[in-house]
Image (spheres, coloured by chain):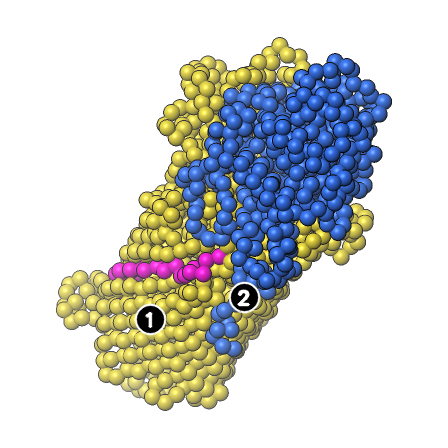
Amino acid sequence: CSEKDLLDTVPSTSISDANAFGSATRILGLVNGAYDAVKAASLYGGRYLLYCDVRGEEFINVTANSYTAYESWNNSYNSGSNDINNLWSQAYTAINDANIIIAGLATSTGVISDTLNAQYTAEARYIRALCYFSLVTVYATPYNADQGASKGLPLRLQAETNGDNNDLARSSVAEVYAQILADLDAAEANLPDSYSSDLLNTTRAHKSTAIALKTRVYLTMNNFAKVVEEAAKIVPQTTAPFSTTSYGVKHALQSDITTLFGTTYTTTESIFSMPMTSTDSYSGQSAIGYIYNANSEYYLNPSGILGNAQWGTNDKRRSLLRVASNLYYLKKYAKASPYVDYIPVIRYSEVLLNYAEAAAQTGDLTLAANLLKAVHARSDASYTFADADVATAAALVATIAVERRIELLGEGFRSGDLLRNLQTIPAKGSSSLQANAVEPSASNYIFPAPNNELTTNKLY
Amino acid sequence: RRISGKVTAKDNDSPIPGVSVKTTGKAIGVQTDAQGNFSIEVPEGVTSLEFTYIGYQKITLPISGQTVNAKLESTTSGLNEVVVVGYGTQTKKEFTGAAARISGTLVKDAPVQSFDQALSGRAAGVSIASPNGVLNNPPVIRIRGVNSISLSSYPLVVIDGIPVSTGNISTSTSVPNNPLSDIDPADIESIDVLKDAASTSIYGSRAAAGVLLITTKRGKEGKAKVVYDAWGSLTKAARLPKLLDATGYMKYKNEAVYNAKILGGNENNTSVAAELFFPDYNADGSLVNTNWYDYIYRTAYSQNHNISVSGGNKTTNYYLSANYSNQQGFVVDNEFKRKSLRFNVDHEVTKWLKFRAGGAYNTTFNQSQNTGSLPNSTFLLIGAARLATALAPNVSVYNADGSYNLSSTGTLGMGNNLVTNTLWNAKALFDLSSYTTENDRFQGNVGGTIKLPYHFELNTTYAMDRLRTENNTWLSSQLGSSGYSVGGSATNVSALRNNWDWASTLSFNNKYRKHHVTALFGYDVQKFETTTWGAYATVAADNFFTNYEGSYSTVAASGNGRSEKAFISYFSRVTYDFNNKYFLTANFRRDGNSALGVNSKFGNFGGVSAGWLVSEEGFYKRLNISHIVDNVKLRASWGRVGNGNVSNDYASQSLYSSSLYGSAATWYLSQAGNPDLAWETSKQTNLGLDLGLLNNRIQVEGTWFNNDVNGLILSAPQSASKGIPDNAILMNVGSMYNRGWELGLTASVIRKENFSWDASFNYTHIKNEVTALASGNSDIIGYTHTSSEASNVTRVGYSVGSLYGAKTDGVNPANGRRIFINKAGEKVQYSATVASGESNWTYLDGTTAAAISASDYYLLGNALPKWYGGLSNTFRYKNLDLGINITYAGGNYVMNGTKGTLRDQRFYNNYTDISKRWTTVGQVTDIPRLVYNDQISNGSSYPISANVEKGDFVRLQSLTLGYRVPSKVFGTSGITSARVYASGNNLLLLTGYTGTDPESSSNGNSNTTPGIEKNAVGQGRTFTVGINVGF
């Protein structure tokens, strides 16, 4: 054989960058690849939810194992912590995957239709926005502390495939939010109304997905008017039943919340979820089903939401818990290995609660109460809210906050809700393990910057 | 008259058949018979006899009386000794580079799995350390230091002309598989170590870390010789730390629990426990007191048998051998087995055509539990070494009913202790899991030599090396197995490494009067193809199944890969010597490497060397000193070699890989490439002086060397926010040097009829310094297993992979808190528990301080030994022989990370030294106040300088006592020689290092993370008895 044949080897199990955008199938594969990066174990594959949940007061850690988020539980992360480095790297990997798609599609013509080109770009921008939002809410000072004036994140908006550009200064929190919203607005404009299957509607972004995420982003910025404006697009009604009627996917609450966890992962309530199959799922400490359920590493804090009167004993949502030795464990992710429970990222009930809170804050108490009750009554129709709980805007906001803790337990919301309201992270503990309270002024109120950035980016 | 006598080998008294015995000056000659006897008719006037035999020095003895007995000395020493160089041989006299030769006899009886493990201390400039005590783990070999940062610093290993795979080819982090163990050490005739560029540059780009040329045994003319060698051994763990018993465990743990309660401001809070550790009792009422060492370590027994037949006539020689080795490691379940067969044949077809062939077939089997000792397994919860020290001693292994004592999730049940344990019950874990890797390999070569007119010779060799490896892992579905949560799992991964090499040379060799010229031109092409595929099955249908072939409900692909790599090389060597006094050698090689960037696949390498045999000069011979120093040779060489040994065959390419998003196919950037990725080059200068004293009884070799490495290939760290896969791209950035000198001394101290003492000593002094690094010389951080353990730093101005971590300054006598030094040089103290509102980190005045992070880390010391070497002595008294091999190294620091585990303040057991912990105000100690769940003060969470210790040591590597059975005992049995011996390995270690072993390396052969001992099993201590029998 010739010298050239011998030396110019090419792999048969991967393709070169020159061919990555070579066919419609491959371009679709790249889009799915960016979603898959979001689905990584340390991000929305589950562990990001775990970090955000156990920081709050709802769970008690059992194992003191730093590989299963003990450091998040007792707020002792340092720059070298695995979780801190892996979460950061993974979210930025997804961002770079999105940037590669955006850049590639900007120059690639003729392989796919312009419509599809615009749609894929929109999906990439949605992914980029989701990742930046996931990072900025944990690694940066909360927006509401100073209207985003603090330093935020290095804002990487171009595809990185070589050794250049290691140094990039942080943009402000406000600039990061502005980019997130710009991406989501652009995504909304070009995403399809719906896809051809329930699976795709749940696992790929469509118009309502971008809008739903915007309600979360604006809520985090206390921009309640915009929350109302966005929510109204996919929740056009003012009284129950609420559902999306103006777009392709008719998002609505399901009658039984337990069907979302373990039975049907692709209902219209699941706006965006991470799909799991036996050939694409996580195991061991990478799987939150293993940590919460199989290995029983966190039980519900009796003095957390578990003991709250708003969470009645007949509430269907209590059937998403299990009891062992008088301790309650979360079983939203209850499948045994292989851990194929989908991981929820956005549910319609969250949008309703986002909407409710914003409505309360903007003075529409009736709508706020209607939305709150719709979410609660779905799981516990017998419960009636005391007037005092819904009479004033302040009372409603507080009640909605409690409802969020019940409804979204174990879905990664608790610490984010504390931080956006600049509340102290409460102390918690058992007889053997304690975690102290963390004031908003404390340095560990947010996650420390990871070493893998600090040591390589001189401008950080 | 007729003279008779017997010819024997000087070193072992065995008779030598086939020795040519001639009357001096006459053509009359005979050969010795099978018993070494001869009888010759000697004409009048002849006063002496000449004895010649291949491989032995010619000897002339005077005739006195009727009997002349001759003892022949082998030619393994002296100037006429043959040195194997790349694609040929030279005599030591002609050789002008730097090399060392290690005889196969030094490795064949060693209780090792692969020959490389037995080379410790045997040659100057060659450092060999065992990173852990797991069988068949590749040793850390460094020839003249670390010569790369990202690429392998393992030397090129060439076996009978074919470069072979090295390193660890197992796909499991539990069981290692060093492919060099596929070679039966007893088949090795010699190991030649090429050290300087002038010698190695004939291997061009592949030789930057030096070359080991392995020559296997071949037959010699004469009657068939049969050799049987066998040994049996016993190995035990050495230097295990002394741990707390059940009572001590409860005492110190509860003290920590109580301290945490007080420090947390919960002194009067009844909901916070004051004690969490309570005793368990056996049925007979006695306290449960488990020594986990009993379940993890053992006395291991091994045996090894070797038989060979070799011989030949004038035209055909053959060597056949068989080996069976069955070895146990001192960690339970650790096994190594080898069966191998080898044949080597040489045939002279005609005067001008020679034919040779050789081959070996073997199977090797490796089994081990996870010991946490292999790279990337340090922090695994299943690591045996950590379990051995950390498991609670106050709970039992079994329940009263004989079942394993387990928690509801399968970890060790904690009895009456009120804490949750994340560590496994070692006994259950080991019983319920297995990790194996097995090789099936054929290595063969066939070649010919054609003598052409005008002193030319054509040589060609085709070699094949086909290695199939099967890696199997089984984890039971039963509770107590680490596979319980996935319903049991089994993984099989099969790998095929197909490697062929075709090398041809045209050489010229002629002497014309005082001029001696040799020239060599060659072409070598080698291709490696590697294919791996496998599957991972989970959810066993029944816990009956113990392998992949059983029934499982979920099966997914695992370990798939396919790659190929090729080297194409053109090379040439010219040597010239004048009057046996002046020697010149020049090498050139042009190499193509498929793994490098499209713009830089080829590189040119080469070297020149010169030697001057001063002692051949007339003026020197007239000096008085020439009577003492009878051989003086000056050597100088310069060369440029390369390194393109990137581990990834497609390292330079930007690649996209495919995976799944649920059930949808994906593509994603899996590797950011660099089309300009080029060779690392090292420019090496070598100056040497060889002396032979007292009729060459003492030989001294001194060499100064300087190796400047440029264009270091570096897995250059990229900002994590760029989102590049693995946050790294391979680039040519950085440079460093290794500079030093080495000294080798061999001496026949005493040579008497009945007593001899031979000694050899070597010493190497080396300085490594990084002179430039990527993007403005930023540090390269090395991690041990996880990104939270930033354990090493490669920094300009320091040696590669220096120790790194948080700097500490003892324990505050006022409050027992560990004092750290932050980046501003300020003292900061830490308490694992504080009351709400207080800070864990404070200045000594109590004000809040920022937590120590990696930005506060300091470089804590060099991890590479600055000096190392060996001393070996062989004593012979009549039929007794005694061998002592001592190795030493030092000038480096070791991170005793295991100390962090031994002081870990979770539910882990501690060592007995924990009694020195701080308890009272004013107490000065280096062990902080015990605070339950404290993982920072003692270096569990990240490395601290308090655990850095000096690594200097002297080791009694081996001590062997042998007895040669007098040949008269054998009578007519056919046995010609027999020796029995007993030896001990690693009998004694003199060191101030308090960890298990200063040579440990949790990161194996990694260049950037040396000197870390963390949760690894140390070296065993081995006692061997053996026998060598010749027929």
Please, which chain is the residue tagged with disc 1 on?
B
* Alpha-carbon span between mark 1 and mark 2: 32 Å
Eyeballing the image, is B892 above or below B578?
above
- Secondary element at image label 1: strand
| B162 is within the stretch colored magenta | no
Eyeballing the image, is B859 above or below B811?
below
**In the image, which is nearer the foreground, mark 1 or mark 2?**
2
Residue under numbered circle 1: B587
Image-based side of A269 in relation to B864, left or right: right
Amino acid type, label 2: Val
Q: Position of residue B884 (x, y in %)?
A: 43, 52
Please, which chain is the residue tagged with disc 2 on?
A
| B674 is within the stretch colored magenta | yes
Amino acid type, label 1: Asn
Q: Which residue is drawn at the image coordinates 72% and 44% (left, top)?
A: A202
Image-based side of B252 in relation to B434, left or right: left
Image-based side of A346 in relation to B513, left or right: right
Q: Quadrant of residue B289?
A: top right
In terms of secondary structure, what is the magenta stretch mainly?
strand
Q: Which residue is drawn at the image coordinates 49% and 41% (left, top)?
A: A155
Chain that is blue in the image: A
The numbered dot on residue A10 is 2
Q: Position of residue A24 (x, y in %)?
A: 64, 60
Q: Position of residue B980 (x, y in %)?
A: 52, 58
Q: Which span is picked out in magenta?
A: B673-701
Q: Nearer the viewer, residue B791 or B848?
A: B848
